Structures are given as structure tokens and as C-alpha cells.
Image: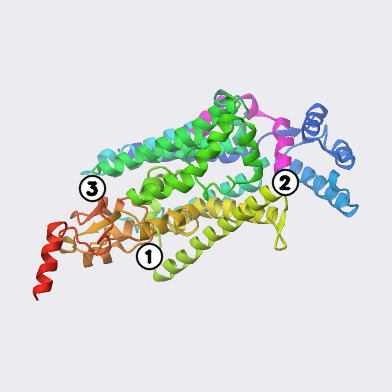
Amino acid sequence: MKAIKNSGLVVFILGLFIFTALLFEGRYELSQETFDTIVASKGYKSELFTNRMQDELVGVSFGSSVAMSNGIVSALEEVNQLHKEAQEWDKVIWDKPHNLAYEFMKPSLSGMVTQNQALFWWLTFGLGILGSLLFILPNVVLLGPAGIKNNGIFQSAATNRGWIGVFSFLYLTGFYLLLYFRPEYILNWVTVLDPVSKALSGNAASQWFLYGFLYCTVMTVMAIRMFIKYRHNAYQMLRTAVVLFFQIAFAFMIPEILVRFNMPYFDFKNAWPLDYDFFFDWNINSLIASGNIGVFMFVWGVVLTLIIVPVMVYFFGKRWYCSWVCGCGGLAETLGDPYRQLSSKTLTSWKIERYLIHGVLVFAILMTAMTLYTYFSGVDTLLGIKTYDLQYYYGFLIGSVFSGVIGTGFYPIMGNRVWCRFGCPLAAYMGIVQKFKSRFRITTNGGQCISCGNCSTYCEQGIDVRSYAQKGQNIVRSSCVGCGVCAAVCPRGVLKLENGPVQNRVDASPTLLGNDIDLLQQIKERN
């Protein structure tokens, strides 16, 4: 079995190596026809830009994506500067430089990958999936009896910030930096998935299709690992299956199929303020312009945010969304499971968490309020602040850097719920409801606790669960996402996830419920 695991590791590393090497393969040559088509579709009025592009870039062959990207970005920025100095605002090109470079470069790419898309899919995604499964599946035999025994979790270089963890951190972070800020460098990765994208939506793949496909693939493979690791716990098995379904169906497949039928791209499970651009003017106008289906999507988004989310939190706590529906939580629970023990349990971390996550929520509320004010009033400035600037900085700092680069890239060094714990505004919104008005709690039985510490070790939200268990106190923390892993790793059954009456939610002991509570009160009164 160990030989199979080692073989799987070799196959996975080979696939990862080929995947990485594709960044440096291919040639780029922008044809006059492609250039004219893009310029016409964009409606550019800048003759300076078109002339410079034709003189310096059209018909020129580039051996690397970096060289061609630098030429396009340089031309755009210098031409825009001239138009701004001359106050020729109608000729300024407002597209983001590297996104524009992506649009010009994707149809200009040629090489082995464009000619052998299926082959390179198998050499990258195929080998990665095969190697991962060969590495994971023997654990059914090697792990022995079901149960979590915390064996060697802090001794492995992969799970305790060792060299493997650092490499994973650098690779994940690098991937997100390229995805968000240099998409023109990953065109071969995107091109490999063109046939898959065309089969679903009828369109060629984009960097976001690559991200969605890779997201679902990684979650599926790591979900198999979850099924094996937590096979002793029915709650974890069901929860993993459900969150995987929501990611593949609602976040990936359905939106792509909607596009194929000329309907808006829409994730029905994504709620504001996690979906921070839901109330942006371009999104509202796009949905309304799509007719009845678009209006339904808009109304659904509003109802989901204002009614469904708080009502569900009241009955089931944050866990119904964070651990059963949300794609961010789904990736954290699957890909991030090996790193959950790295979540800091210090008091300082808890203080930072409270201020940071609620600060992001306030930022989202202010940005959305200004966005709606702009939409209905037609004025783009309030108190000297431009709405567009606020949207840009939120999208850059929170939507990209925090939720993507840090939120996922930092799994191997800060634990798997960095974004959920410190940055997600929807988690903050639901946490407020859960803290003060929810039927959900984790009950504890202090008399059975042996202080093994498994619960605190495996808590991805940085909660010192053992301290509650030792005291027999219910856990009603606003940060708790109800993943239930603390209960799954407890060897004595001390912890239990429950939905009960709001009364006595904080102080009630699981051994003193119903009539027992009344009896205890009578005894206290007599004494």
C-alpha cells in the first residue's frame, strides 16, 4: 500500500510540474483581423492607441507572454496619460491593463497546447487527479480502525509549517496572484479547458472558468479524502457530500448552463455581502435587462440576504451556510482540512478577528449604501468620496487580496478558515444573529471530558473548545461555523451539536434539560 501511495505522489508531482511548465510554452502573434474585431467591439475612439498597437504589436511574434503583455500594458498606460493631460476623456480606455492584455493575447496564442488540448488536459489535470487518488485511497487500509487519533499531525512537514507547507503556501499564493492580477500569463492553463467550457456554456474558457473547474476538481478529490478520514461520523460524510453538491451544481454547472441559454451568469446560493457586487449598477442593469428571469434573480438575491439567511441562522446557526452550502467553506473543509490545526487559539488572534471581520462588514455596508445612493440619485460622489473608488478598493483589497490570495493561499501557514474567520462579511452578519438569537449551540458534558485536547486542536475557527468542555458550558460563539469536527474527533462523545430552545441556550447543561432544569431550580431555592 505504501508503494501505491508513493507512486501516486510521483504521478501528482509530475502533473504539477507539467502544469507549471505550461506557463512558459507557446508563441503570441496578434493578427490585424483579431485586432480590428476587438477594437470594434470595444468601441475605442483613441487613434493614438490603435496606431501604436498596429505599429509595435500587430503582426509581431512574441516568444513569451510577459513580453507581449508588457507591450500592450505600456501602450495603454502611455496613451491614456496623453489623453488625460489633453482632457480627452472620451478617448481614455478605462479597461484594466492586464485584463485588456488577456483579451488581445488569448486569440493570439499558438503552440503545442492549442493543438493538443485533450492531451495536455490528461497530462495536467488527469495526472493530478490520478496521483491524488493513488495517494489517498490506500488510507482506507493504512489508517486502520475508524476514528481520529491525532497521530503525528504536528510532526509532518506538510501540516506544521514545514518545508512542504511553505512550498504549498508559495504555490497557492502565486496561483491566486496570477489569477487575479496577471491572467494573461496563464493562457495555456485556460486554453486546456476550452473544450470543456464550450460544452457547457458554448464559449471559450476564461480565467474564471479555469478557477471554477479547478475549484470543483480539488474539492472532489479532497472530499474523497474527507470520506475516508471521517468515515466513522455520518454527520461529516453527509455534510461533505452536500457542500460538494452545492459547489459543483450551483456555483459552477448551473451558471455556465444559464449562459448557454442567453441568461445571466448567476450563483443562486451566493448572498450579499459575500457577493459584494450584487448591488453594483452594472449587475442590476444586466439582470433587469434580461427580462423576467433576471428580475427573479435580483429578487431572489434580496430575499436570500434579508430573509432566508437570518431565518435559517435562527433555526440552525451559521452551519447551514458556512459548512453545508458556501463554496469558500467547502474548499476550506476539503482542501484545507490538513491545515485546520494551524488556526491560532490565542487571545490576541480572537481580538484581531473581532475587529477585522466586523470592520470588513462595515466597509461592505458603507460601499453598498453609496452604490445604491449613486444608482438611484445619479450622483457619483458622496461627502467627497467617489463611489467607484470605494468599489475598486473593496474589490481589490477584500474581493481579491483578502478572500483569494490570503484567504486560500495562507491555508498551509494560518489554517483553513483564514477568510471565514477574519474577513468574510457574510460570516460576520450571520455571526451577529447566531450570537444573540439562534437555536444552535454545541452542548458539552464536562464530567466525561478527559482533556485530550483533540477538540481544540482541530477547531478551524480558533476556539478553545476544551475549556468549554471542561466546564460543561455550551458553545455559542459567533465565530463557530458548526462544522462538527470537534465532536467527530472527541473520543468520549462529550460534544454534541444541537438546535434547541433559545432560553437557557448559554448556561444549560446537556445533562440538565427539560424537567431536570426545573428540579435543579427547586433545589437551589430550598438551599
Q: Please state the horizontal and vertical placement of residue 423, each as a whole percent of the image.
A: 50, 57
Write down the quadrant of residue 66 in the picture.
Answer: top right
Tell me the residue that label 3 is attached to: 147
Q: Quadrant of the C terminus?
A: bottom left
Q: Say whether residue 112 is magenta.
A: yes
Query: The residue tagged with tag 1: helix, strand or loop?
Result: loop
Residue 181 visible to an observer of this rendering: yes
The residue stretch that appears in magenta: 99-125
Tell me the residue that label 2 is attached to: 96
The residue that appears at 55% across and 52% down in the rendered structure is 405
Judging depth in this view, the residue of 189 and 119 nearest the camera is: 189
Tell me the residue that label 1 is attached to: 345
Q: Is residue 118 above or below residue 272?
A: above
Q: Quadrant of the N terminus?
A: top left
Other residues around mark 3 within 10 Å, as few (<14) / some (14–19) / many (≥20) = some
- Mark 1 or mark 2, which is nearer the start of the sequence? 2
Discs 2, 3 touching: Cβ within 8 Å: no
Q: Is residue 20 above or below residue 353?
A: above
